[in-house]
Amino acid sequence: MPLLLSGQSFRQELEACGCMAIHTPLEGGAETRLLRRLKGAGYRTQIISARGLGDPEVFLMKLHGIRPPHLGHQSVGRNGAVGEVQQVIPQLNELINENQPVALWVLEGQVLSHSELLSLTDICHREPLLKLIVEMGGARSLTWKPMLEFLSD
């Protein structure tokens, strides 16, 4: 339990590697405790899900377009059945612009492909203030390792 009391070793490893793969107990609670410790250390924190993320770099860092879901019978006169493209601001746009470090917790990271996980690691190396914690599944106890080390196993 000392790990969850301070979170010091987790934070030091996260700052060293930038992107961390983590396995958490299925009953939950570990992520909120660790994020609270990171907030106490001066990080701005956010939780997102990996499902529906698409291209991680575009979703997190660049202005991108999305189309609304098709709702059935629509006129084909103006936009057809696909709908208008709506421009969406990047998920981390306002968080990265300040000089405060950002910790982003990605839930259900096991659905991401190898190349998407590498892309997340590259984002962390380019943006020194951004730290990513990717939840890669459940375990009996809280375990973590750097993402590059996780991908090489």
Image: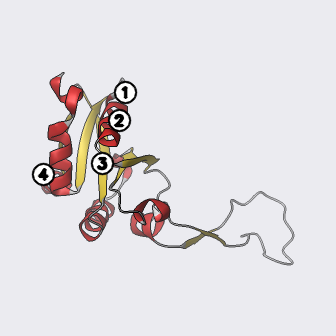
**Rendering quarter of residue 136:** top left
Left or right: residue 100 compared with residue 73:
left
Q: Position of residue 91 (x, y in %)?
A: 49, 60
Give the residue pinned by disc 2: 36
Q: Position of residue 6 (x, y in %)?
A: 21, 31
Give the residue pinned by disc 4: 153
The three-letter amino acid code for the residue at tag 4 is Asp
Quick one: label 2, few (<14), some, or many (20+) residues within 10 Å? some
**Which badge, 3 or 1, comes first in the chain's sequence?**
1
Distance Cα–Cα, label 2 vs label 3: 14 Å
**Which badge, 2 or 3, comes first in the chain's sequence?**
2
Left or right: residue 72 compared with residue 133:
right
Q: Is residue 151 visible?
A: no
Distance Cα–Cα, label 4 vs label 2: 30 Å
**Which badge, 4 or 3, comes first in the chain's sequence?**
3
Residue lying at 30% horizontally and 61% vertically, measured from the top left:
129
Q: Which structural element holds mark 3? A: strand
Give the residue pinned by disc 1: 28
The answer to whether residue 149 is above or below residue 35 is below
Residue lying at 37% horizontally and 33% vertically, measured from the top left:
32
**Which badge, 2 or 1, comes first in the chain's sequence?**
1
The three-letter amino acid code for the residue at tag 1 is Gly
Distance Cα–Cα, label 1 vs label 4: 25 Å
Q: Nearer the viewer, mark 1 or mark 4?
A: 1
Distance Cα–Cα, label 4 vs label 3: 18 Å
